[in-house]
Amino acid sequence: MSNSRGMIVPKGALKLTMDTTSDFDQLACPMPQTAQAPHDEVLAEVLGQAQTIAVVGASPDEARTSHQIATWLMDHTPYEVYLVNPTALDGEIRGHGFYASLAELPVVPDIVDVFRRAEHTPAVATEAAVVGAGTLWLQLGVVNDEAMDIARSSGITAVENRCIKVEYARLHDRIKAARVSAS
């Protein structure tokens, strides 16, 4: 049997269609939806007024996205960055040690930036609420309605399926204006 391009396709082989590929792409990394984050004005205000960020799920492994975003935050923003990962307590990133939990931080984080699988985020949202964090931010590809409900019902600004680095770069001018108005 051959396909439309004349290639031989074994009998019983999986036939990929645009629908199959689209389903896979959505499962692999869901496209950000407008309802998954506040409006740009609110995001700029959150990012402009924040002073501290806890990166939950940060990794000492330089190849991990959580490591790269944590170092970017350290290098390109005025935030105090705290690293949270109970399995990395012996590690460090640029002299910043790791904490086992949000409760162990020496400050209440303004933003909790989460690099954990979606099924772990309700527990992180609960912990963020208990410590009094201002914003729960689930990184790009992380979506969990329960975590968002926990955050919102606790008065926490809730963001999901967004990369904090991308949003910071995209809203840079608005963030600077929010910082000026806050001071």
Image (cartoon, grey):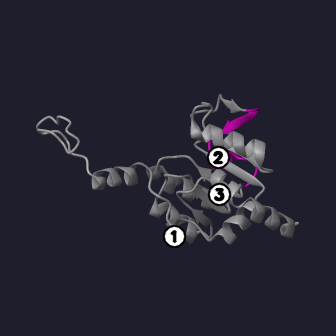
Q: Nearer the viewer, residue 102 or 23?
A: 23
Which residue corresponds to mark 3?
A: 167
Q: Earlier in the sequence, mark 3 or mark 2?
A: 2
Q: Is residue 106 visible?
A: no
Q: In front of the other: label 1 or label 2? A: 1
Q: Identify the image quadrant of residue 14.
A: top left
Give the answer, above or below, for where 59 lies relative to 16.
above
Between the residue at mark 3 and the residue at mark 2, the CA separation in whole angstroms equals: 16 Å
Residue drawn at x 84%, y 68% is: 182
Q: Is residue 110 visible?
A: yes
10 Å neighbourhood of mark 3: few (<14), some, or many (≥20)? some
Secondary structure of the residue carrying tag 1 is helix
Q: Earlier in the sequence, mark 1 or mark 3?
A: 1
Q: Position of residue 123 (x, y in %)?
A: 51, 54
Which residue corresponds to mark 2?
A: 55
* Quadrant housing the C terminus: bottom right
Residue drawn at x 12%, y 39% is: 12
Which residue corresponds to mark 1?
A: 35
Amino acid of disc 1: Ala
Amino acid of disc 2: Val
Secondary structure of the residue carrying tag 3 is helix
Secondary structure of the residue carrying tag 2 is strand
* Quadrant housing the N terminus: top left
10 Å neighbourhood of mark 1: few (<14), some, or many (≥20)? few
Span of residues in magenta: 94-108
Q: Position of residue 49 (x, y in %)?
A: 78, 63
Between the residue at mark 1 and the residue at mark 3, the CA separation in whole angstroms equals: 15 Å
Residue drawn at x 64%, y 53% is: 166
- Marks 2 and 1: in contact by CB < 8 Å? no
Residue 100 colored in magenta in the image: yes
